[in-house]
Image (tube, rainbow, N blue to C red):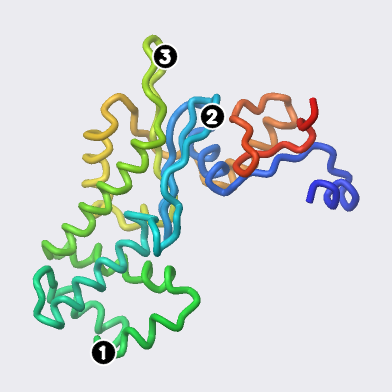
Amino acid sequence: LPAALAESLGVTRLALAADAVTAFAGALGQRPGAVVAAGTGLIALGTDLTAWQRADGWGHLLGDSGGGAWIGRAGLDAALRAHDGRRGGSAALLAAMESVFGPAQELPAQLYPRIDRPAVLASFAPEVARCATAGDEVAAGILARAAGHIAESASAVCPPAVVGAEAPQVALTGGLLKMGDPLLVPLRAELAAQLPSARQVAAAGDPLDGALLIATALAQDALRLPRHPTLLYVPAEQGR
């Protein structure tokens, strides 16, 4: 890629950044802290400006705990439990599931052959939030557990506070935040409990803003974010 860009566009300076890094840069710029990118999946990335720490981002089968697909799957599980008469079921989530996907017995045939299963699962997450807002305790419990998982990932990557230095910042970014208070209220409480020495802040921008920040900093010899072979790679620096 660097050679192709140099040949076709005359690019002489290039940074290859993972989307989690551009999310971090967009949210916090070039300062110590942690960012959780929460959408269909979930990944947390943190740095003390000397190295990166990553948590989760393992996909909907192995992780992404607390992300949209995780919430949607938990909601559908509670719906099917209600359909079967098992403990942990929610009649409200069952009704929501049937309004979206049709009869319960048809759901497996709809879901399992799909190559976009994570997105299909995540499409049910807003229904979990609606049921929680309406007072369904099972749905609210799912979002509380999701908040705990998200805060755990943030806690795993956030650098420790340094005496005499600014407290590390923690920011959230991604489409999952559109769920609003049903998720954000328990999430803020979990972050305060698990990261008492960090400061919760609103993300300053999105991943596109982060890509522009990285490009600008690179052009000005002011890129302070840690280099990494798969997270933030600057080919021209190799061999210096």
Nearest to the observer: residue 194 or residue 167: 194
* Disc 1/disc 3 C-alpha distance (Å): 57 Å
Residue 96: percent from left, percent from top: 23, 77
* Disc 1/disc 2 C-alpha distance (Å): 49 Å
What residue sits 37% from the left and 64% below the top?
Answer: 69
What residue would you read off at disc 2? Answer: 51
- Describe the element under mark 1 as helix, strand or loop: helix
Q: Disc 2, disc 3: CB below 8 Å?
A: no
What residue sits 23% from the left and 40% below the top?
Answer: 190
Horizontal side, residue 237 vs residue 45: left or right: right
Residue 155: percent from left, percent from top: 34, 36
Of the image marks 1 and 2, the number of the one nearer the N terminus: 2
Q: Nearer the viewer, mark 1 or mark 3?
A: 1
Q: Residue 166's quadrant in the figure? A: top left
Nearest to the observer: residue 130 or residue 36: 36
* Disc 2/disc 3 C-alpha distance (Å): 18 Å
Q: Nearer the viewer, mark 2 or mark 3?
A: 2
- Describe the element under mark 3 as helix, strand or loop: loop
- Describe the element under mark 2 as helix, strand or loop: loop
Q: Does 102 appear above or below 158?
A: below
Give neighbour class at mark 2: few <14, some 14-19, many 20+ (Cα, 10 Å): few
Residue 210: percent from left, percent from top: 58, 41
Of the image marks 2 and 3, the number of the one nearer the N terminus: 2
Q: Amino acid at mark 3?
A: Ala
Q: Amino acid at mark 2?
A: Ala
What residue would you read off at disc 3? Answer: 165
Q: Amino acid at mark 1?
A: Gln
Of the image marks 1 and 3, the number of the one nearer the N terminus: 1
